[in-house]
Structures are given as C-alpha cells and as structure tokens.
Image (tube, rainbow, N blue to C red):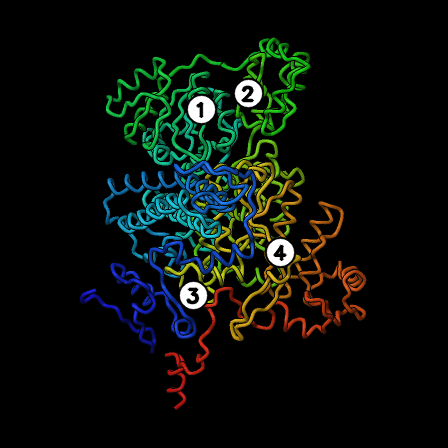
Amino acid sequence: MGDKKTKTVLGSSEVDITKVCRDIRGVEDIVLWAVENDWMENRFQQFDTRIFPFTDQADVSEWDSHLLDRYTPLYCNTVETCTDCPLGPCNLSSGKGVCGLEFEGYQARLSLRKACRGCSTQMVHSRELLDYAIKVFGREKEVSWGAHHDASDLSHIGLFTCIPMGGQNLADLDRALAYAEAQLVKLSSASFTGTDAIELEGMVFHAGSMLMIGKDVIELIKMSLFGLTNASDHEVSEMIDWPEVNVVGGLGNVEPGKPVITFMGDTFLLAYLVANQLKEKGLTEKVEVCGIGPAGDDLARFYERVRPLAPMTKARKILRYGISDVLVGGSSCMNLDILEDTKRVGTRVIWVSRDKNIGLPDRTDSFVDDIVKDLVAGAPGAWIRLPEKAAEVALKVLQQVKRKGDYRLSEEKAKAEAKKCREDCDLCFSNCPNSLLLSKAVQQVAKEGIKALAEVEKGCFGCGACVKICPENIPLLDLIVASMEKRAPGDKFKLRPGRGPLPRVETSSWAFSSMWGNTPGICHLLGCGDAKHEEDLGWIAYELTARNFITFVAGCAAGEVARHFNEKTKKYIFDEFGAEANLRNLINTGDCAACVHILDQAMKWPRTGAGASHYGNFAETADIYGNLVSPPLLVWGALPDRMYPIVAAWARGGCPVVVGPESAFDWHRFLPGNKWDWKRWWYYDSWTRKKRPVEPAPKHMIIPVETREEAVTAVTIMCQRPVAIRDFRLIGLETYVEFSLAAFGEWPDDWPLFVRSSWELPVRYKAKMLRELADKHGWEVERLNLKRAKHPDGRLVDMETMQNEFSCMGGVYPTRVPRMFPDPEIRNYKTSYEIGVKEKKS
C-alpha cells in the first residue's frame, strides 16, 4: 500500500480502514471518503460495520442465504435433462449428474441464465450511452443526481462500488459500469458450472443488483447531460403537481395528415437528437413524434409533444397498423420481427443498435444523401451506427417519403378471408398464448364484418402464433389489425412525465405521516403491458392510491396506468392524484431504467432512520430496510426476460414481489413462504442475541396471483412488518380484510397471525374479530379486550407474555444478520458528543 493513508478519525474514534475492509488495495480513496463523509461514530462503535467496495456476490451471502432459507425456491416449467457439458446429457430426475449436479441445481442454473440474459440488452444500452457521452463530453465531465441530493442519498452505484455520490464524473461511471459488466461475466460463467442451488439463486439476486447499476448509469447521463426532468433540482413545494400532466398519448391523439416518426425500444439518444433538430428547425408543430416502449417514456421527459403509443408487448400491432412513416428502432426488452411488419405498410426503418442487426444493409459509411435517396425510393431500411448520421437521415427521410396510403384490409377483403375459416378447426385458439376465442370471432366477421373482432383485438398482443398454425393461411393478424380502426380514435390517455429521482428531503417529509396509521403502505408498480387485461393495472393503481397508498410507477406500466379514466370525476388518473412522494399520490419516475429511482429511494431508509452508511454495505442496509419498510412490488402483464433480474433486485432488498396474471405461469422461479410453519419466522433480538418468533411478514418473497382483486389483497398484507407500530398495523389489517371481502366474499384465513394487541383491531371489524379469535382460535376475550393469546407453540399466554416472546414490540432492535449484534461493551464507549456534554457540565 506504500504511503497511502489508511487511518482516519471519526469524532473521538480512530478508524483503521484495513480493519473494516478486507482488501484495501486500489480503493483506499473511496473507502476513506465513505468513512469520513458518511459514517456515524455511534454506529461504528456499536456494530461490526464493514465496507465491501466492488462487492462480489459472496460478500452478500450472509443476507442472500437468509432470504433463500426462509423463502425456499419453487421452480416451474422445469427441465429434467442437463446438456451443459460433454459428459452428458444427464437426466437429473433420477439422481445426480456426472458432475454432481442435482435437479434443483440445474433449475437454479437456468434461473441464473435467464437473469443474465435479461440484463444483457439494458447493459448494452448503458455501455453505448456512456461511451457516446465520453466521446462528446470527455471523461472528466461531472454528473449529478441533482441539487437536493447529497452523500446520504442512496444509489446502487454507491451501494455496491462505494464510489462517492458527490463529485462523480463520467470516469467514475465507467469504473462502476465496468465492474457491473465484469460481475455479469462471472455470473454467466457460473450459470454453466455452478452446482449449489442456493448459491446460484444468490447469484440471480446479484445479477439484479448489477442491472440496477446499469440503470443508475443511464439515468445519471440522461439527467446530467441531456436535460431530462429531475425532481432533485426542484424544491419540494413544487412537487405537488410537477411535472404537469401535459403529455397526451394513444393512437387517437396522433394528428392525421402529418408525417409520423416513431421511436421504439432503447433509442433515447436518437430521439433526443431528432427532437432537438425539430426544435431548431421549427418543425415541432408539423411532425408527429411517437414512442413505443421506453423511447416514449424518455421523450415525455424532454419533449412534451410526444405521443406515447404502447408498451413493447403491443409493438407489432402498432407497427402493422401503419401509422409510422419512419421507425427508429433499437434493442429492447423484446425480440420482434420488425421488418415483416414495416415492409407490409411501407414504414422505413432506421436501425441504430450497435450490438446486432435485423437483416438491413449496413449504411454507416454511406453518404447521408445516398441513404436518404434509397430509402425514399423504397428501400425498407438501413442500419446506421453513428447517432448523428442516423438522426439526420431519419429527419430527411421523414420530410420526403410518401407512402401509398391505406395498407389495412378492407371490409370486403376481410369478409372474403374470414369465409375460409372452418367450423371444425380451432387451432388458432389452442395456439394463442392469451386463449382468445379467435375462430368464433373470425366466423362472425364473414357475417357482420370487421367489428366482430373488436373484443379479440383488445386482448391480442399481435404475436402472430395464430397465423402460423392456420391451415387455411388466413391472414389473421391482418384481420385483427384492421379491426383496430374502429377503436383507434378513442385510444387516448394523459400521462404525467417521469420525474426522475426522489431526494431525501422529499421522502423525509412524509416519513412521519406514513408510519402513524394514515396509510396502509407504499406500493411499487411495474409491468410491460398486458393485452388481455389492459385495464387491470390502472384499476389496481386507482384502488391502492385512493386508499391512501403511496404509489410509485415506472416504465411501460406508467402508460398502462395512464389509460385509467374515472367516469365519475371525468378525469384521467394522473389528473386525479398528485405527484409529490406523499400519501394518496401517484408518482411516475420515468422509463424502464428510471425504475431504479424507486428502489434507490426506498433503500435509503437505513441511512436516514438508523444512521447506517450504505456505501459498499448492502447486507446491513438490506437487513435494516427489510425489517422496517421494504414496500411490495407488483409486476403486471407480459414479462420479458429483463423483468426477471429487476424482480430479483427488489426481492434481494427484502421487498416482496407479486407477479401476475398469465405471465405468472411462465415465471421460472418463485420464492414462497409457509405462513403456517412458525419456526421459520424469527428475528434475532440484537440485545439478547436470541431468536424471537414473529408473525409471517412478509408472507412471500415472490408469489403469483391470477386476478387484479387477488393482487391488491396480496399487496396490502405484504406491507405488514413485525416491527410496524400499532396504528400502521391497524389500517393495514383493515384494508386487507376489506379487499378480501370485496374480492372473495370471505375473510382471509390468516388475519389472526397479525394480531398482537386488541388496540390493533380496526373499529368496524373489532367485535367480529374478537368473537372469531375466541371461538375459532382459542384466545381469551373479556368484553372488547384480549386477555390471553394463543402462542404459535400452542400455549395460552397473557398479552404481556405474548408481546415479550412473540413479535418485535417494545423497542426491540431486530436483525437477521448475526454480525449486526451490538457490541456487548457498548456502554463503555464514549462518543465525541458524550465527551462534549461531560466537558460542558464540568
């Protein structure tokens, strides 16, 4: 280490960083910064606090293994035969493979591969955007989370690399992203060589965390260098209605007669360059700019005339509808046969991703005018890997191209095609992932016309599985797209643009009110769109927010939620609720990458409330956060691979995840809990160092549901925590029962598990609850009070004993990580504050 500084002073305490960091070589500067700027002397003296800069998965295994012990992996859609090595194949259903791999281990390998695959496209986008920024602005260009962010505000970059929050530049982001990329290479290797299921599932968690770093990098660059909305640069008083609900989306809001350019996928940079050119040339009123997937969400944060159209899951229908003159496309969370759809309608494609092509000629080195000439003449598209050139080509083609007009099937043509449908065939239904009654509807088209497909069209993703299986070669997808013409004029919604991060000063403002019975909890909503249940996510968001939930949304889910229209108030949902991170508000953080702000904001509580530095300190942060808050995440709709590591990142932080509806059947691995096995539910009392049994909260870590009613019920009970105070528990239990009665017509079977005191019983249900506790569960009741409770071990004990032996009431500091036991000699320590007080008195 040479002459590098390895010791510093924290108040009255000397800190030797070689004792708190396993290997200090090469990271002395950032570890010293973290200790000097973000550590608290009290916590250093009381706990075995450590720093893990550039964290490996094994560094967090003390936390990961606990989660996977309580929530045992449950695999679906399993594969029995392993073909990973030359010694195979091995059928693992009958025993170990040649290398010792067991059945569960192989399923965990597949789980890790899915996670790594899901990270890949977003990480490629992170790298492309960062490399471009470095070329344009230089490595020393500073980036910032905003004026109101400070060192104590959490990011996954700091959480896993220990790189300081303040004074970051592009070189720091390069260092962080290179670390995440290297970690994913190791994880990908382990997905073919690892054998221990629990260890591999811990690596799935780690893949999710690395993806969050990639998202942090993207967001920092977008906000700092390209001017996307950033709430941290605004005062808290402005947040009530900021950003304004000024973006209108949907096919019905695209003005006819104007040239249309559509951006799809991770094409932020091209969207930014083209939008700027439109502003400079005064063309914003003469051109319609549309977005599909994350591109639409990004555009909304800097170009208010954007028309977000749909999530990526519905991209094929939008493309084949033929509204776009030019499509600028790039890699995204889904692989689609774009050219098949755009060729049918004459849309010219500018493909811009550097990591792959889609069968277009590489025109990167061609002259701009030559590319434009060919595209206007009828060439289907071009692959252009230089952003500025691609933007120039896209705008020139948009101004010159003339498509022939209507590409959709006419009423007569549709009827003629529909007559081919045989009554003895139902292959399209059996092959449809959404189980749509397509053949019956097609037969009606022959009699009634295209309008007979209206209901089928609403539930269709446009995957084309029906077309491939049809023995009569009926262009079923063309029929479905033709029926969109009836619905398109009414396809409208209003969106509040994403606001970016949530600084500590804003979240601190609602911390008090959120804990004292004013809200059932906080909820995070994500999703990639759901055709068959398009209205569900908006309904869910409204039901939760109207009951005083603090509801966060990001990505394609924001556009789906935005479609919710209240017929009573005649308002769209974003008009109805405020934007500040507070009770009864709906907060949109931005596109898919911006979902990281939701998790970053949530995980800052250990620093704000317990003084625990998060720099290079995931296990301690997650332990405190998982005990205190860890809001549930609801993921709704079709779930591409990218969502798999996103869910893993949430679950790793102790946030329970609810997945649904049909996509839940395709999920590879769930993490259910067993609420009736009370010995699994415990915390350490950090003072006595003994285990305390607690209620099963959260009940599950990753669990599927099938209906929106089941979803809101599950989300509500997932908000409960053993450390929650009386009033919060009361309103949570009341909302849980209310949702259960509304959805299923009966009380939940497990509500007694969450009762610790008669004061926690909601008034309107209290009498019935007391009767049921007495009659069905053996509790002793005296009038409106609980006298004796049934302990999980079967004993009937008085309420004081119950509270002392069960739950975390009475100021108990709980932990699930033995390293977090306070030092038994804590009272012998004197902090600099205590020394100062003593000196004043003397």
Instruction: Say which residue label 1 marks.
Output: 337
What's the distance in space between the residues labelled 3 and 2, CA to CA? 55 Å
Dot 1 or dot 2, earlier in sequence: 1
Dot 3 or dot 2, earlier in sequence: 2
What's the distance in space between the residues labelled 1 and 2, CA to CA? 16 Å
In this view, the mark in front (1 or 4): 1
What's the distance in space between the residues labelled 1 and 4, CA to CA? 44 Å
Instruction: Say which residue label 3 marks.
Output: 612
Cβ–Cβ below 8 Å for labels 4 and 3?
no
Q: Specify the label residue 442 is tagged with.
A: none
Above or below, 449 relative to 690: above
Q: Specify the label residue 481 is tagged with.
A: 2
Residue at 67% across, 74% down: 801
Above or below, 777 relative to 118: below
Residue at 79% across, 62% down: 767
Residue type beneath disc 4: Pro
What's the distance in space between the residues labelled 4 and 3, CA to CA? 26 Å
Q: Position of residue 813 (x, y in %)?
A: 53, 70
Above or below, 379 relative to 824: above
Q: Nearer the viewer, residue 258 or 752?
A: 752
Instruction: Say which residue label 4 marks.
Output: 520
Task: Specify whether 771 is left or right of 404.
Answer: right
